[in-house]
Amino acid sequence: MARPAILIARAVFPEVEHKLRQHFEVEAAPPGVVWSPSQLVERLQGKVGVLTTGGERIDAALLAACPQLKIVANLAVGFNNFDLPAMTAAGVLGTNAPDVLTETTADFGFALLMATARRVTESEHFLRAGQWKEWSLDLFAGAEVHGSTLGILGMGRIGQAIARRGALGFGMQVIYHNRSRLEPDKEAACQARYVGKDALFEQADHLVLVLPYTPAAHHTVGAAELARMKPTATLVNIARGGIVDENALVAALRERRIAAAGLDVFEGEPTVNPALLTVPNVVLTPHIASATIPTRTAMATLAADNLIAFLTEGRALTPLNPQVISA
Ligand code: GLV
């Protein structure tokens, strides 16, 4: 019997590709290649599964053009690139890659918070440019991190892991806002206090965004929310770019209505709003919060295992629309 054919839409580590080749006929994007939507549809012809990275949009038009497709395994915990209702309607299973990246992503959230509050990249640019002439008392004086108030918007697994770092490691007062309040034992484990959304913006010294992106979450942080923040506050976004109105943020940073921002995600990534590049008090990184070799290997392996489990045994490890399996 012919083996099922699958596509790897963006290059993965060789050991993960090798694992998939033990079960399937595999076509894989070469390293560095990003297919356009029409090239993706072309490559998907005859494929029953695809490993995507979050950069490939899976919508009704693609599904209609790829009727053989049965599963899309996303190598990301976020799945805002999926039109999940359209996938369910087409009987296509979606899976994501949760849990394996939680602690690594929380580490990076904290790294970005620290770099932003303590002006790490701004001061390094100054030094590299040969501008450092003498030590002075207020040279790149930043914001205090230990003992300050850490605000977290979106208190899922990653939000809770960031809260633990802040409370237990840095003696911060942690406040959070989320669609639903955590169970008391979970709140206690990360020493976090639930507050309303306005209070979160008003009280946080450092505000980290970790909420999932949905159309309803578009521009959750706009001019009105930025206006509520302290002029000394920092804002860190490791969620999705569309959560922040970048033009409003640029204006707030330029006018020092907030002190600084750290962004790992962007509205039009990989294109970065040129205005952001002109603002000194922002730290910019290229969507790398989960990027360590062990974690990215674990994410790719989980996506591969979802493809293998579903296409060989009809089950999945981390299904997003399990009703497709039961149907
Ligand atoms: C990365 O942004 C992810 O969703 O895993």
Image (tube, rainbow, N blue to C red):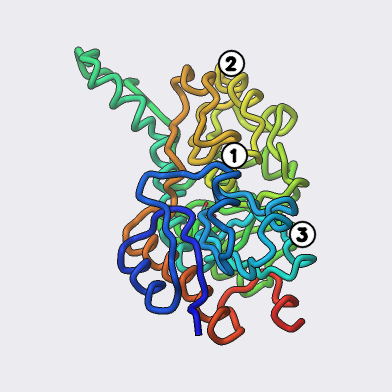
Question: Residue 212 location in percent, x, y?
Answer: 65, 53
Horizontal side of 128 relative to 325 (left or right) equals left
Separation of disc 2 and disc 1 at Cα? 21 Å
Q: Residue at x 53, y 35 (%)?
A: 234
Q: Is residue 184 above or below residue 227?
A: below
Question: Residue 128 location in percent, x, y?
Answer: 23, 21
Looking at numbered disc 1 in the image, what kind of residue is underneath it? Gly
Q: Is residue 308 above or below residue 101?
A: below
Which residue is tagged 3? 86
Which residue is tagged 1? 241
Does the beta carbon of the residue at mark 1 sit less than 8 Å from ligand 1?
Answer: no
Which residue is tagged 2? 255
Of the two numbered discs 2 and 1 in the rendering, the one whose residue sits closer to the viewer:
1
Q: Nearer the viewer, residue 311 or 53?
A: 311
Horizontal side of 19 relative to 47 (left or right) equals left
Q: Picture quarter containing residue 112?
A: top left
Q: Residue placed farthest to the front in the image?
A: 1
